[in-house]
Amino acid sequence: MPYLVNGLSASSVPYGYNAQPGETLLDHFPPLPDEVPSYDAALAAQSSAASSSALKAQAQAALDRSDVTMIRQYEEGNPAPAAWVAYREALRAVVAGTSTSLPTQPAYPV
């Protein structure tokens, strides 16, 4: 029995299946899901992971540099400035992945 698929006439489907009147090949494929993961979504996820690891590396480097400031304060017998303590805690949060923004470095203690 002939039928039309995208305007082309055919008499049977491959593998010996004979179409019923009014059927098309598309009637035998499952519907597409509402959301099909795309290459763009996968690329965005990869990019997000890369930027997250870059942010963590920046925070770790800033934390390492701030060690020098804290050691100098300790060596001079000065208490650790509260702004620097908060800054270092915020950097540790970025390194741990619980924060997504780098804090602003406070002014150097005098």
Image (cartoon, rainbow, N blue to C red):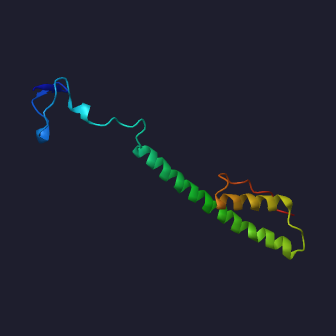
Q: Nearer the viewer, residue 55 or 72?
A: 55
Q: Quadrant of the C terminus?
A: bottom right
Q: Residue at 67% of width from left, 51% of height from top?
A: 101
Judge from the rendering whether residue 20 lies leftward or rightward of residue 77; answer left or right: left
Report x, y in % for residue 22.
19, 23
Q: Nearer the viewer, residue 75 or 54?
A: 54
Q: How many numbered circles does the render carry?
A: 0
**Eyeballing the image, is 4 above or below 29?**
above
The image quarter containing residue 6 is: top left
**Eyeballing the image, is 38 above or below 71?**
above
Report x, y in % for residue 10.
11, 29
Q: Quadrant of the N terminus?
A: top left
**Eyeballing the image, is 3 above or below 34?**
above
Judge from the rendering whether residue 109 lies leftward or rightward of residue 35; answer left or right: right
The image quarter containing residue 78 is: bottom right
Report x, y in % for residue 96.
66, 61
Q: Residue at 77% of width from left, 58% of height from top?
A: 87
**Eyeballing the image, is 33 above or below 61?**
above
Judge from the rendering whether residue 57 lies leftward or rightward of residue 85; answer left or right: left
Q: Residue at 45% of width from left, 49% of height from top?
A: 43
The image quarter containing residue 21 is: top left
Judge from the rendering whether residue 59 lies leftward or rightward of residue 2; answer left or right: right
Q: Nearer the viewer, residue 69 or 38?
A: 38
